[in-house]
Amino acid sequence: MINLKFTYEQALEFVSKEQIHGYQEEINKHYEAIYNKTGKGNDYLGWVDLPEHMDDAFLDEINNTAESLKAKSEVAVVIGIGGSYLGARAVIDALSHHFSQLRKEKTLQVLFAGQNISEDYLTDLLEVLDQKDYSLIVISKSGTTTEPAVAFRLLKNHLESKYGLEEARQRIVAITDKEKGALKQLANDEGYKTFVVPDDVGGRYSVLTPVGLLPIAVAGFDIKQLLAGAKAMKEHVKQSKAIDDNPVSGYAAVRNALYAKGMTTEIMVNYEPRLFYFTEWWKQLYGESEGKENKGIFPAGVGFTTDLHSMGQYIQEGLRNIFETVLSVENPDHTLTIPEDDKNLDKLNYIAGMPLHEVNHMAEIGTTLAHMDGGVPNLRVGIPRVNEETLGELIYFYEMACAISGYILDVNPFDQPGVEAYKKNMFALLGKPGFEKETEEIRKRL
Ligand code: PA5
């Protein structure tokens, strides 16, 4: 039994049921390629079985490590970039109090570093850490990614001067490859507690490994429920491949049918600010998986109603190559109604007594209809509320749909060769040993 509901009725003005169902046979084959590991990138299918592989004993080990970090820290800094950070941030942000940093109750704060190379960002972070007890969770599968390596070097130095070498070692957990890479070697040399990023799980599919699970546990959330949600989705997806019974098949089929009709941009829409980073996670998952060989749907994200006042005009009347997928939350965690006002100068008394969620919901329906009228097909992924279980379902749903969609596009959804291009230029410009030829070539272009 799953909570997630996928509906595509609001796309049927733009693409027919026949066209959507035309993908069924192909989708069936792609499931077989995934389950039998015969398709492109089949070395990276470890995420498919993570809901079972992350068993209770292993999750207890993660929870125990989280508890030992929490016992001595007011802040945990998670260092990582791309797939080594977005999944954890997506789940933590979705489950956290919106203003947790300003609340009186003493809860451990999770901060992030290594996702940029900004001098000002890291300076501000170090300044805050001067005043706080903290620990580091450093995550890099390759162990050689520049951004987290730079941040870790700075933060490790800070931690060691603050606590001394031995105590600093107790405050660092490394999540990396099981045997290779600079971070693994350092962790061995220094005796850090380590967790492994499985060989067969790529960064953007790794949120249900320690990469996502340890930061999420440190933030105080229930990783067993997260995995339970993912497992429920996994079992549901296995029961039927049919487009109208299986949300993964449905989503993969409709978005590809729309793409075939020239809808080359998909906008993920949410009406809950807490889902901002979930959208960022989804953007990486789909952007890195599909955008290659001059193909792929461009994944964009907006938060409504906020962005209706910035992007709404474009979506309503701009270039007609977009469709929207609304990630819709049916129930809020709280009730807050609009108060009556004697003066009624803002003319809001007609909705006095109405819960805000209902206003938000009407905004959602009104916007969907307006965008359809403006030529924007709408898909809807609904969940009853935001919690660990529904986030687990969403994660598995989007991962599997991404793999199937990538196979429909006939690309390898598990590699990211294009990410290397900027690194090569940056290394050449920085004068990294081994990049002398590239440095020469780049100088000629400047
Ligand atoms: O999805 C991916 O593979 C990438 O986004 C990586 O996760 C990202 O580049 C970070 O790599 P690493 O974990 O090796 O530092």
Image (cartoon, helix red, strand yellow):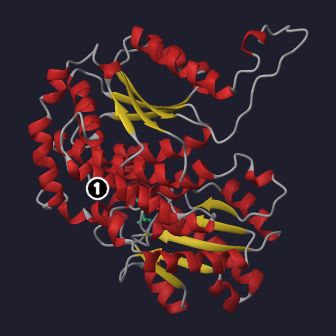
Residue 129 in the image: x percent, y percent?
A: 76, 68
Residue 98 in the image: x percent, y percent?
A: 70, 45
Residue 325 in the image: x percent, y percent?
A: 40, 30
Q: Residue at x 32, y 26 (%)?
A: 8
Which image quadrant is residue 243 in? top left
Q: How many marks?
A: 1
Task: Using the image as rendered, state which of residue 39 and residue 129 is in the foreground.
Answer: 39
* Amino acid type, mark 1: Glu
Residue 363 as seen in the image, left or right of residue 75: left
Residue 316 higher or lower than 427, as above or below: above
Residue 206 higher or lower than 315, as above or below: below
Where is the C terminus found, in terms of image quarters? top left
Which image quadrant is residue 101 in? bottom right
Task: Using the image as rendered, state which of residue 407 and residue 66 is in the foreground.
Answer: 66
Residue 426 as seen in the image, left or right of residue 39: right
Which image quadrant is residue 341 in? top right
Say few, some or many: other residues with alpha carbon within 10 Å of mark 1 (under 14 / 14 to 19 / 20 or more): few
Q: Residue at x 50, y 80 (%)?
A: 61
Q: Is residue 141 visible?
A: yes
Q: Is residue 416 visible?
A: no
Residue 356 higher or lower than 97, as above or below: above
Callout 1: SS: helix
Q: Residue at x 23, y 18 (%)?
A: 15
* Furthest-right residue in this view: 342
The residue wearing badge 1 is 235
Ligand 1 positioned in quadrant: bottom left
Q: Residue at x 13, y 61 (%)?
A: 36
Task: Using the image as rendered, state which of residue 264 and residue 48 is in the foreground.
Answer: 48
* Furthest-front residue in this view: 1
Residue 333 in the image: x percent, y percent?
A: 64, 42
